[in-house]
Amino acid sequence: MRPPPQLLYLSHASILEVGLSLADVEAAVESAFRAKAAGEATLPSKAGFRATEGSAFFLPMAAALHAPPLAGIKWVTVGHDNLSLGLPSVTALVVLNDFETGLPTAVLEGSWITATRTAAATAVAARRLARADARRIGLIACGVQARSNFAALKGAFALEEAVLYSRRRETAERLARELASEGMRTHVATEPREAVHGMDIVVTSVPPEPGPHRFLDLDWLSPGAFVSMVDLGRSWHPGGFARLDRIVTDDRTQTAANAKATKLPYGGPFHAEIGEIVTGKAAPRETAEERIAFLHPGLALADLAVAHALRERAIQRNLGVWLPL
């Protein structure tokens, strides 16, 4: 007789103890992009909603990978007033299910997964779409995503200088001190243009707020620049998108639907999906002068791939808490 089914719960502390490296996360995310491009994944549409005016925003993100066979959902919430209350603005849980029986196999706190898989997606794209000789990086907003994206990009490029801009100067100064302690030359910008013009790589991770806050101009980008729009492009004026040489996303359909539902400035057309570039179906950067943007709302496939890697490593290391069903 089979033992009663159980699921593994991994808290934030347990996930940190697992010790999954950035290289491991990047490999998992790239495998998810490859699976999607190869038709070896199922990706239902996202269906975000607010229960009432002013309530938190709720976003269930479901997906299934065919190899390794697993399904699951990432349950994301955005509380627009949370930062003023001393709470994180974005929270998430990831639930993994057995592909055949449908039984849940794991529940994971999702903040680390969200930060690292997003940064890994930036790195996967940048390796193919940024110039290999990139040395200067501009960071617009200086929170969790700025830190995780910088860490991933530092592993992919010989970065030497970071220019940081935040609407709260103290957050930019704090991050600048951290990066300087790692040997980076840093400069805290007083105007956002300083962190865009002349940069080889730009990462914008402005947190969501009610109403449009478009204070960045894509015409500031220098020839050859690569920008990762972690903030879904919400901080950029819409007029400049048409003047970029290439715009890449993670999923055309979901990005277009997300832009329409949340009134983001750009939802397509796109030159390619990142999975098409990873698998060689579409070309990577072709000239040193191209200005290229990667706009990626995030694939649940990537979250599941990282969560699966965490679960497997946690079991090997006897970490987490087993819960009966």
Image (spheres, rainbow, N blue to C red):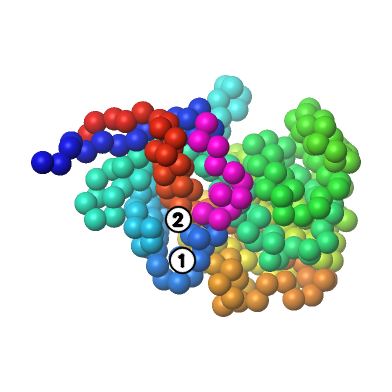
Question: Is-magenta flag for residue 243?
Answer: no
The residue under label 2 is 301
Q: Which residue position holds label 1?
A: 36
x then y, percent, for residue 236: 70, 53
Whether 188 is drawn above or below 262: the answer is above
Q: Residue at x 65, y 61 (%)?
A: 125
**Which quarter shows the N terminus?**
top left
211 w.r.t. 79: above or below: below
Q: Amino acid at mark 2?
A: Leu
170 vs 147, nearest the viewer: 147
Query: Which portion, as a residue range, is magenta?
Result: 17-28
Which one is earlier in the sequence, the residue at label 2 or at label 1?
A: 1
Q: CA distance from mark 2 to mark 1?
A: 8 Å
Question: Quarter-wise, where is residue 179 in the image?
Answer: top right
User: Magenta stretch: residue 27 in it?
Assistant: yes
Amino acid type, mark 1: Lys
The part of the image, by quadrant, that contains residue 134 is bottom right
What secondary structure is marked by label 2?
helix
Compared across the picture, whether 298 is left or right of 316 comes to right
Residue at 38 percent of width and 47 percent of height = 73
Cβ–Cβ below 8 Å for labels 2 and 1?
Answer: yes
Count of all numbered marks drawn on residues in the image: 2
Res. 214 visible in picture: no
Q: Could you tell me which secondary element the residue under label 1 belongs to?
A: helix
Residue 101 versus residue 174 in the image, above or below: below
Which residue occupies the foreground of this view, 192 or 34?
34
Residue drawn where x is 56% and y is 30% of the image: 88
